[in-house]
Amino acid sequence: MTAPDSKVPTVTPDQAPPEAEIKRFDPTQATPARRYNALLGGKDNFAADRVAASGIRNAFPDAHIAAAENRRFVLRMVRHLAHDHGVRQFLDLGCGLPARVDVHDVAQEVHPDARIVYVDNDPLVAVHARALMQGGPQGRTEFLVGDLCEPDSILAHPALRATFDPGEPVAVLVMAVLHFIPDTAQPHIAIHTLLEGLPAASYLAISHGTAELLPTAIRDQLRVVAKDAAQGTLVSRTREQVAAFADGLDLIGPGVTPIVDWLPDLDPQPTSTPEQAPCYGLLARTSAEAVSSACPAAQRVRACAFPTAMSKVGRSPAIAPAVDKSHPVP
Ligand SMILES: C[S@@+](CC[C@H](N)C(=O)[O-])C[C@H]1O[C@@H](n2cnc3c(N)ncnc32)[C@H](O)[C@@H]1O
C-alpha cells in the first residue's frame, strides 16, 4: 500500500511492537499485508511477498489493478460515510500497511475531529502504522494489534475505549480482509459480535474478493494458486455469501455490487471493470434487533463494550437505508 514515494518510517522505542509481536514476524513467509503492498507497487515487502504477488499475477494479470481499485473503494466509502452519513468514528479492521492516502486522511478532511482505530494482526503493519498513521491534532488515531476473529479482545482494548465516544455510531471497515478467513474461523459470528458491542446505528462496510466476476479460465488458474501453501488462505465467496455478513442489518445504497459500481461518482473514481477488480462491496447499518436476531450464535449474553452508549443512544429502530481519476494507486 505504501506508494514508491512514501517515507521510510522512523520507529521510536515507544512505537516498537511488544516482543511477542516481533516473534511472529517472519520475512520468509508471504503475508496478505505485504503481498498487497507488493501488488500496489509499495516498498514495504520482502522477496517472499513479491514471489507470492507474482504467482497471483501469473494467474490473474490484473491483480495489481484489483488492489488499486480496492483502495479507491475504501476511500470512496470513507468519504461517503463521513460526508453523507456524518460518521466521525471509524474502526478499520485489517487496515494493512500505511498508504499514501489513508482512512484518517479522508475522514479528517471531512471532519477534522474524526477518530480512527486501526487494527491488524500483522506485526509489520503494527510497526509502520504506529509510526505513520497519525492524524491531525483535532482528531485521534490509534493502532492496535488484534485479530478480527477475536472480537471481544478488540472491543475490550483500552485504546478503542479511549478513542471512541460511546454516544456516537462507529463505521466498521472490513476491506479486503474476509477473503483470508475461512468459514471454519467463523468470521460471520466475529463481525456480528463486534457490531453487537458497538453503539446502535453503527455501520458495516465490506469489500470481498470473488471469483464469480472472473472469466472461467482465470478462475481455474487462481484455484491452482490458492492451493499453494505459500499463498496462505484465499477464500472466494459468492454474492450471496458476502451478503450473509450483513444478515439482519439494513443494506444502504446499491446493495452487494462490484466495488467499481459503488459510488462511482465520488473521488477517487473507479477506472476499471468488475472483471479487473473482482470484489463485491456492501454497506449496512445496525438497528434495534438487527445484530442479535440475525446471528443466533452471537446472541449469547456478553458484556457490551459500550454499556453507557446503549442506554444513551438507545437501541434505535432501524434507520431507513437511506483525487485524481487517472491516479493508479491512491
Ligand atoms: C489485502 S490487505 C487490505 C488492507 C486494507 N483493508 C485495504 O483494503 O486496503 C488485508 C489486511 O488484512 C489483515 N488481516 C488478515 N486477516 C486478519 C485477521 N484475522 N485479523 C486482522 N487483520 C487481518 C492483513 O494483515 C492485511 O493487512
Image: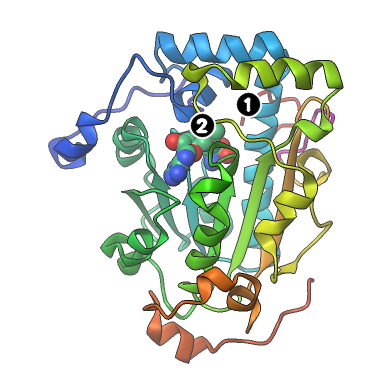
Q: Which residues are magenta?
A: 268-273
**Residue 315 against residue 135 in the figure, above or below:** below
Q: Position of residue 56 (x, y in %)?
A: 62, 15
Question: Crowding near pointer 1: few (<14 within 10 Å), some, many (20+)?
Answer: many
Question: Crowding near pointer 2: few (<14 within 10 Å), some, many (20+)?
Answer: some
Q: Amino acid at mark 1?
A: Val
The circle drawn on residue 100 is: 2
Q: Position of residue 237 (x, y in %)?
A: 71, 41
Q: Is mark 2 within 8 Å of ligand 1?
A: no
Q: For the residue labelled by badge 2, is the local secondary structure a helix, a strand or a loop?
A: loop
The circle drawn on residue 316 is: none
Q: Main secondary structure of the magenta part?
A: loop
Residue name at image x 63 percent, y 78 percent: 293
**Residue 203 against residue 50 in the figure, above or below:** below
Using the rendered image of the protein, determine whether residue 293 is visible from the camera's viewpoint: yes
Q: Amino acid at mark 2?
A: Arg
* 34 is within the stretch colored magenta: no
Residue name at image x 39 percent, y 55 percent: 150
Q: For residue 248, which quarter of the picture? A: bottom right
Q: Position of residue 328 (x, y in %)?
A: 68, 23
Residue name at image x 50 percent, y 33 percent: 99
Pointer 2 with pointer 1, Cβ within 8 A: yes
* 270 is within the stretch colored magenta: yes
Q: Earlier in the sequence, mark 2 or mark 1?
A: 2
How far is disc 2 from disc 1 in space, using C-alphas? 8 Å
Q: For the residue labelled by badge 1, is the local secondary structure a helix, a strand or a loop?
A: loop
The circle drawn on residue 329 is: 1
**Residue 329 against residue 41 in the figure, above or below:** below
Using the rendered image of the protein, determine whether residue 101 is visible from the camera's viewpoint: no
Q: Quadrant of the C terminus?
A: top right
